């Protein structure tokens, strides 16, 4: 979900090269068809335009899984985000709609599907932005914290109820994709191709939480150690 651009597209390319049968989804169908056309010969690829904000998005996901004869891995890369220092209401609400409601709708649908199937793996990209509330991007940081907490809750739920459902939470730092274009220049920018390689490896190894890369692991450790009083005064 979210294979039409950025990190999701790069992950899809790697999985295709690895021989996976893939269901590609996002709102824009054209880039998904382009990706399908690039797949190695003989690959099984299905495309379905899905908007995670629509009430029927969960049913569409199930239809896509059916077309492929079942789903082993659900990968959620869909998301939007913008700096919003003026607290523009439409940005705050659409971000919440996509990253919170859309996320819970689709990840929840995949979880229930895997309960019925008896096993499965859910991997999703949250962000290092969920580590603390970030003044320049209130709804983005808050919805990324929601995503991380939701995945942690599902992981515990699966273990407590004896479900064979694996959960992987991917938290990258700044990545050079369309999501950041138009905002100011970001430091320590990662390449989507490198992040995608790390993600595929983390999925294969069944990691629970993966922060990308080591510099952001260090940075978020420091953020966590900062006393609240200092964080409140920090200029980001
Ligand atoms: N770039 C970064 O620095 C960074 C850092 C940490 C985490 N992340 C997270 O990584 C994920 C991927 O972002 P990206 O950087 O690769 O940005 P991107 O290139 O803008 O990709 C975002 C993807 O989400 C899809 N999407 C957006 N709204 C959707 C909706 N309503 N329904 C279905 N799909 C939707 C987009 O497809 P359509 O427009 O075709 O629907 C696109 O495929 C996001 O969750 C983002 O928050 C990004």
Image (spheres, rainbow, N blue to C red):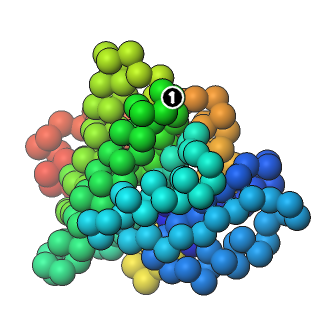
Looking at the image, residue 142 sits to the left or right of residue 183; the answer is: left
State the quadrant of the C terminus: bottom left
Residue 171 on image: x %, y % = 45, 46
Badge count = 1
Residue 164 on image: x %, y % = 47, 23
Residue 6 on image: x %, y % = 57, 68
Which of the 4 image quarters holds residue 182? bottom left
Residue 72 on image: x %, y % = 58, 40
Question: Image point 51% across, 47% down: which residue?
Answer: 74
Residue at the disc numbered 1: 119
Res 217 seen here: no
Question: Image point 38% across, 59% down: which residue?
Answer: 59
Comparing 205 with 102, the one in front is: 102
Question: Image point 36% across, 24% down: which residue?
Answer: 158
Which of the 4 image quarters holds residue 183? bottom left
Vertical comparison of 110 with 37: above or below = above
Comparing 77 with 118, the one in front is: 118
- Element type at marker 1? loop
Looking at the image, residue 56 sits to the left or right of residue 35; the answer is: left
Res 125 seen here: yes
Vertical comparison of 12 with 18: above or below = below
């Amino acid at each position: 979900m979210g294979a039409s651009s950025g990190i999701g597209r790069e992950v899809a390319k790697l999985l295709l090269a690895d021989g996976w049968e893939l269901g590609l989804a996002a709102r824009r169908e054209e880039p998904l068809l382009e990706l399908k056309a690039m797949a190695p010969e003989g690959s099984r690829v299905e495309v379905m335009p899905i908007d995670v904000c629509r009430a029927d998005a969960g049913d569409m996901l199930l239809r896509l899984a059916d077309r492929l004869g079942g789903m082993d891995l659900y990968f959620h890369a869909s998301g939007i985000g913008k700096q919003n220092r003026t607290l523009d209401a439409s940005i705050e609400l659409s971000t919440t709609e996509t990253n919170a409601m859309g996320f819970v709708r689709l990840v929840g649908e995949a979880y229930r599907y895997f309960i019925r199937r008896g096993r499965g793996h859910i991997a999703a990209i949250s962000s290092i932005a969920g580590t603390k509330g970030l003044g320049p991007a209130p709804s983005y940081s808050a919805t990324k914290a929601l995503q991380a907490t939701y995945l942690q809750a599902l992981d515990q739920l699966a273990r407590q109820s004896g479900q064979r459902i694996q959960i992987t939470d991917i938290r990258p730092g700044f990545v050079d994709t369309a999501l950041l274009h138009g905002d100011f220049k970001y430091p320590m920018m990662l390449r989507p191709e490198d992040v995608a390689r790390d993600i595929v490896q983390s999925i294969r190894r069944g990691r629970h939480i993966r922060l990308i890369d080591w510099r952001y692991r260090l940075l978020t450790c420091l953020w966590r150690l900062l006393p609240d009083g200092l964080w409140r005064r920090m200029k980001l």
